Image (tube, coloured by chain):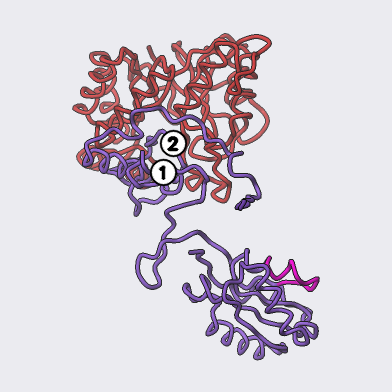
Chain colours: A purple, B red
């Protein structure tokens, strides 16, 4: 799930300077789950904008904002309200914002910062475990991703900053390589430790990424 | 074998640091640090080259934090062109410790992969396998943390570094005699010489600062207490350092002295 958080009001006010009328768009998927851009948040944003002296021409919540075609269809259903707006404020991750900007020449204002692909520990608690690197070696690292969990993304870890099994970049966090070592030992195998991992192929994934499922 | 270290300035002129280097007692070599502690300094290539020109043997420290594989290879070839042969290959402290905490940490290569890169260049080819016009000659070493637990986890990395071409190991500053002994024995089995990192403690306050803020350095509680209770903390710090040097003479092949401005005390530490 893509974890996002709402931008600070000071930043939003700055971006909204000179824009009187806004059309709001939320997302029913990830942004709803992490309480940053769901229906409730869209209503609250509408209230806040009105209190700032702005006009809200209308609002909608797209089921999945990252779905480009659906976003276009939903926008067309609110054509008049969208037309009257000076800008479209989107309470979705960057992918959702750009689904909208594909379809409209109007200025888009992202209300959220997209943070990471998150696991859900429990309601309201999210952790990044996968950074979408495009070359998964979790079988060798006993299910602990060093690209994500090692602050330096080392493939031949640990570094010299590990202290009492903790990471130098954040002492609250375990050193990923200490965890990998413990788990592999418990599983009775060498795993990733039996080879020197070669430098990562950063061109494998493509930047920006594209993937086409051929029939 | 005794080495010390100097840091490039946060500026242009090398006059002052070269003066410091010249005033060092006759040592085996002098390390040039690379944006140490993730604090931005002048590129260490220049100072290393200047030392080489003065007839002072440099050890160029190179980290994986600030440069991708292309820049690392470029800098290695540049270092060789400046007459620099000795390298200390490091991962590098995380940017959060330094003066540019918002910088993107690169780590395109890790220290093992960089050691492999050094080896490849020495064989006349780059990381992509393409032939070099001429090959540099390097003597590369790596760092190690004798205090790290579990020991097995640190040992496997040390083995990888030796397999990747590390010809010597310089340890992080350590104060634990038993761990030094254990590390020395393991390194001896791998047939790699050890240069023990010895840090001169000047006060209890300094020791506590290191424990709180500097990654990889752990001053034991009893040492901090000794410094606190001492009438002359610097003298106590020197005594601690002298003991470590003595231990290094028995189970290691050299010492790397970190005296933080008190390079004048180096001869006394080696007595």
Q: Quadrant of the C terminus of chain B?
A: top left
Label 2 marks a residue whose chain is A
Residue at image position (26%, 15%) is B189
Residue depicted at x 71% and y 84%: A77
Q: What's the magenta region?
A: A98-108
Residue B78, image x, y percentages: 65, 19
Q: Is residue B269 magenta?
A: no
Q: On the image, numbered disc 1 is attached to which residue?
A: A146
Quadrant hosting residue B52:
top right
- Label 1 sits on a secondary structure element that is helix
A27 up-or-down from B30: above or below: below
N-terminal-most mark, 1 or 2: 1
Return the x and y of residue B115 as percentages of the image width and height.
48, 22
Q: Is residue B56 left or right of residue A83?
A: left
> Disc 1: which chain?
A
Please determine whether, in this image, residue B121 is positioned above or below residue B176. Answer: above
Q: CA distance from mark 1 to mark 2?
A: 7 Å
């Amino acid at each position: 799930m893509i974890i996002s958080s709402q931008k600070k009001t000071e930043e939003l006010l700055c971006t909204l300077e000179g824009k009187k009328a806004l059309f709001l768009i939320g997302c029913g998927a990830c942004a709803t789950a992490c309480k940053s851009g769901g229906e409730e948040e869209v209503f609250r944003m509408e209230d806040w904008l009105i209190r700032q002296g702005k006009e809200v021409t209308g609002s909608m919540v797209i089921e999945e904002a990252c779905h480009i075609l659906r976003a276009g269809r939903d926008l067309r259903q609110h054509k008049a309200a969208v037309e009257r707006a000076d800008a479209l404020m989107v309470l979705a991750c960057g992918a959702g914002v750009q689904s909208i900007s594909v379809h409209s020449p109007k200025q888009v204002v992202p209300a959220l910062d997209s943070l990471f692909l998150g696991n859900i520990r429990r309601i309201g608690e999210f952790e990044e475990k996968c950074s979408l690197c495009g070359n998964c070696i979790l079988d060798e690292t006993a299910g602990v991703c060093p690209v994500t969990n090692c602050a330096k993304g080392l493939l031949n870890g640990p570094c010299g900053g590990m202290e009492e099994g903790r990471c130098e970049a954040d002492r609250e966090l375990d050193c990923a390589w200490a965890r990998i070592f413990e788990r592999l030992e418990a599983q009775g195998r060498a795993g990733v430790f039996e080879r020197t991992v070669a430098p990562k192929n950063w061109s494998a994934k493509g930047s920006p990424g594209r993937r086409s499922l051929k029939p | 074998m005794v080495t010390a270290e100097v840091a490039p300035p946060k500026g242009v002129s090398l006059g002052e640091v070269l003066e410091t280097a010249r005033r060092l007692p006759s040592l085996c070599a002098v390390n040039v640090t690379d944006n140490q502690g993730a604090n931005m300094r002048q590129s260490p290539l220049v100072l290393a080259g200047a030392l080489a020109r003065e007839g002072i043997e440099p050890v160029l420290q190179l980290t994986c934090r600030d440069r991708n594989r292309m820049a690392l290879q470029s800098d290695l070839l540049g270092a060789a062109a400046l007459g620099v042969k000795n390298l200390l290959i490091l991962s590098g402290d995380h940017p959060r410790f330094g003066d540019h905490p918002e910088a993107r940490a690169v780590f395109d290569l890790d220290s093992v992969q960089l050691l492999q890169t050094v080896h490849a260049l020495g064989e006349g080819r780059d990381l992509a396998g393409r032939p070099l016009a001429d090959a540099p000659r390097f003597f590369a070493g790596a760092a190690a943390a004798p205090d790290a637990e579990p020991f097995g986890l640190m040992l496997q990395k040390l083995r990888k570094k030796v397999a990747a071409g590390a010809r010597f190991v310089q340890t992080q500053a350590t104060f634990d005699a038993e761990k030094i002994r254990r590390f020395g024995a393991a390194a001896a089995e791998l047939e790699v010489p050890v240069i023990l990192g010895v840090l001169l403690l000047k006060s209890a306050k300094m020791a506590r600062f290191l424990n709180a803020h500097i990654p990889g350095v752990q001053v034991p509680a009893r040492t901090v207490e000794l410094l606190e209770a001492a009438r002359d903390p610097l003298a106590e710090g020197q005594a601690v350092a002298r003991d470590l040097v003595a231990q290094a003479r028995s189970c290691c092949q050299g010492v790397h002295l970190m005296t933080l401005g008190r390079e004048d005390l180096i001869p006394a530490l080696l007595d």
